[in-house]
Image: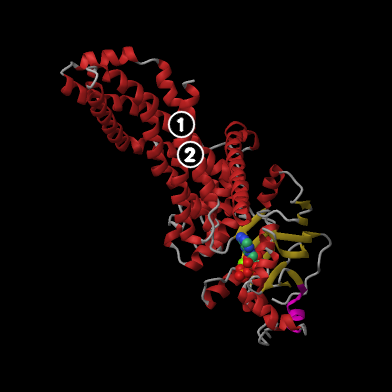
């Protein structure tokens, strides 16, 4: 998948100067991102770099301290909850653990968005559900409960639920987490197939390098709450930036030791000063 | 000392925050109940009925057993105390008033807090941990409309209903013991009970039970929604919700009783 895609005019997702806090701690320090129509953007970074936090802001699950998040031209930090509900019909999300509703069958899970947002009759909804299950290779599993599925099947069922409304934007949190390499590669194939079939813009958050290089059109590298780099797969691979080389595993990270700070940490001085 | 004051200050602020959150949950639930249809998001009647079955119908046997026992207990104590004044027969009035005004709502409140309040906290906490709440939100389904409103509504209907039921069973329990102990006829007992009771006595208990229902539901949901940290967090939230709900019920009961009888 090394298509040289034409970048179309208007970005469909735009994050501008996003600053976010958990409590009093600032975890995102002014993130800028723009993602174009039909593009697969992978947000990559080490543990704790802020990937999940960026994703939560793009989904409107967290409220930023400052900055804007524009989805399909609407700034979700400024619109009403009613407008955001309407916007959300164009958005699909597949969460890290699948987040299937445990009290419902797989089929009911997948149909839920249709049931809540459309007036379709039961038969039509069933058919749409089976079409999506077919797409994710889970045909015939609609009557099982989520607890009866394997990890890879849960992810695929979650994906089927995410795309049931044929969303324009699809968000994917850690698709490979907890899966073996083969299943993970299958899931990557599936993501590419969905983009091809539905022309969806896809944002994937992951720390898996193999997966990233397989599916990404462009990559955003996050590091400690900052965007380190945005570029194509080749640009990121060939980057001479030290931190990026660390992430790609070509170097072991140097650990700076400041003797005094270390001592302060051990004795708890630091805490008392700021607290 | 300063540390202590700071702690107290922080606890007050977080307490107030929780109270504000509780109020907003309550108000938002009623917004969805009354105006949800305008946004194409009505509160599901099926979900409400399902909750009613779980909260109310399934609790009938245990409610009956507890209130019958409390009725007997009141009769024993009442007869014992009144004997000193040679006024045992007045026990009928005592039982009727204390069951309807105090014991039935309290017993049912505590029972439902332990049974259904904890279930709410556990269910919602688990959903929070597994990101099901996030999933609802991004699908465009308000968790308050989808989860809170049906359960709150079911509580507000079923807890008073159970309380009324406990009124009757509790008085039956009292009658059962008194009839045997005092050698009066069941008819006479019922007759005197009806004479002693006013609609106000029964309503006082019912009003209380509605307040208890709101406390149980809101406390359960607040604790469930605020779960962090996996299965252990769910366990903590469940325990916390039962303790908080029962404490609040008892305090509210006292305040209510004071207010209604002054
Ligand atoms: N609920 C929370 N409360 C407080 N701090 C949090 C919370 N969630 C994340 N953080 C902090 O915010 C920072 C960014 O976390 P985030 O979860 O976004 O990282 P991540 O890149 O997704 O990491 P991982 O790959 O481990 O999932 C981290 O330092 C983390 O400790
Ligand atoms: Mg994460």
Ligand 2 shown in quarter: bottom right
At label 2, counting other C-alpha atoms closer than 10 Å, the crowd grade (few under 14, some 14-19, many 20 or more) is: some
The answer to whether any part of residue A121 appears in the image is no
Q: Which residue is nearer to you in this view: A113 or B22? A: B22
Q: Position of residue A45 (x, y in %)?
A: 68, 73
Q: Which residue is nearer to you in this view: B250 or B32? A: B250
Image quadrant containing the N terminus of chain A: bottom right
Would residue A60 be found to the left or right of residue B242 on screen?
Answer: right
* Residue A118 falls inside the magenta stretch: no
Which element is circle 1 on? helix
Q: Earlier in the sequence, mark 1 or mark 2?
A: 2
Range of magenta residues? A228-238
Task: Please tell me whether residue B184 is drawn above or below residue B228 in the rendered image.
Answer: above
Q: How is the image coloured?
A: secondary structure
* Residue A236 falls inside the magenta stretch: yes
Would residue B147 be found to the left or right of residue B170 on screen?
Answer: right
Would residue A29 be found to the left or right of residue B183 on screen?
Answer: right
Report which residue position mark 1 lands on: B254
State the residue lying farthest toward the bottom. A251
Report which residue position mark 2 lands on: B248
Q: Position of residue A83 (x, y in %)?
A: 72, 44
């Amino acid at each position: 998948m090394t298509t040289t895609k034409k970048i179309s005019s208007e970005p469909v997702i735009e994050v501008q100067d996003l600053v976010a806090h958990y409590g009093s701690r600032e975890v995102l320090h002014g993130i800028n991102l723009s993602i174009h129509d039909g593009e697969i953007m992978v947000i990559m970074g080490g543990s704790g770099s802020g990937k999940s936090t960026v994703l939560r802001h793009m989904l409107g699950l967290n409220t930023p301290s400052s900055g804007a998040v524009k989805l399909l031209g609407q700034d979700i930090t400024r619109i009403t909850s009613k407008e955001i509900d309407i916007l959300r019909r164009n958005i699909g999300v597949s969460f890290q653990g699948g987040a299937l509703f445990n009290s419902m069958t797989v089929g009911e899970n997948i149909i839920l968005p249709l049931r809540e947002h459309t007036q379709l009759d039961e038969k039509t909804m069933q058919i749409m559900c089976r079409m999506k299950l077919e797409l994710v290779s889970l045909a015939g599993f609609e009557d099982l409960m989520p607890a009866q599925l394997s990890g890879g099947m849960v992810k695929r069922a979650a994906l089927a639920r995410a795309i049931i409304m044929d969303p324009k934007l699809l968000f994917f949190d850690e698709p490979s987490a907890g899966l073996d390499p083969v299943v993970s590669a299958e899931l990557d194939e599936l993501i590419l197939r969905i983009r091809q079939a539905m022309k969806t813009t896809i944002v994937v958050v992951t720390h898996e390098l193999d997966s990233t290089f397989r599916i990404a059109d462009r990559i955003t590298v996050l590091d400690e709450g900052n965007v380190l780099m945005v570029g194509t797969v080749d640009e990121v691979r060939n980057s001479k930036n030290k931190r990026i080389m660390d992430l790609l595993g070509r170097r072991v990270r140097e650990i700076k030791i400041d003797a005094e700070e270390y001592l302060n940490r051990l004795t708890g001085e630091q805490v008392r000063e700021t607290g | 000392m300063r540390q202590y004051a700071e702690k107290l200050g922080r606890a007050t602020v977080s307490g107030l925050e929780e109270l504000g959150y509780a109020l907003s949950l309550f108000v938002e639930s009623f917004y969805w109940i009354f105006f949800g249809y305008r946004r194409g998001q009505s509160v599901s009647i099926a979900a409400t009925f399902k909750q009613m079955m779980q909260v109310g119908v399934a609790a009938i046997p245990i409610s009956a057993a507890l209130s019958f026992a409390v009725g007997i207990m009141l009769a024993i104590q009442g007869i014992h105390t009144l004997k000193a004044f040679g006024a045992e027969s007045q026990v009928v009035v005592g039982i009727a008033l204390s069951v309807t005004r105090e014991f039935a709502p309290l017993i049912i409140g505590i029972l439902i807090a332990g049974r259904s309040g904890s279930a709410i906290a556990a269910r919602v906490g688990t959903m929070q941990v597994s990101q099901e709440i996030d999933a609802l939100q991004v699908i465009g389904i308000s968790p308050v409309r989808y989860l809170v409103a049906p359960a709150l509504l079911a509580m507000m209907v079923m807890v008073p209903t159970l309380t009324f039921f406990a009124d009757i069973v509790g008085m039956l329990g009292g009658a059962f013991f008194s009839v045997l102990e005092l050698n009066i006829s069941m008819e006479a007992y019922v007759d005197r009970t009806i004479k002693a009771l006013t609609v106000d006595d029964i309503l006082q208990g019912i009003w209380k039970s509605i307040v208890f229902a709101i406390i149980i539901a809101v406390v359960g949901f607040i604790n469930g929604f605020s779960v962090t940290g996996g299965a252990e967090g769910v366990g903590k939230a469940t325990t916390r919700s039962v303790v908080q709900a029962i404490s609040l019920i008892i305090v509210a009961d006292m305040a209510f009783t004071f207010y209604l009888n002054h």
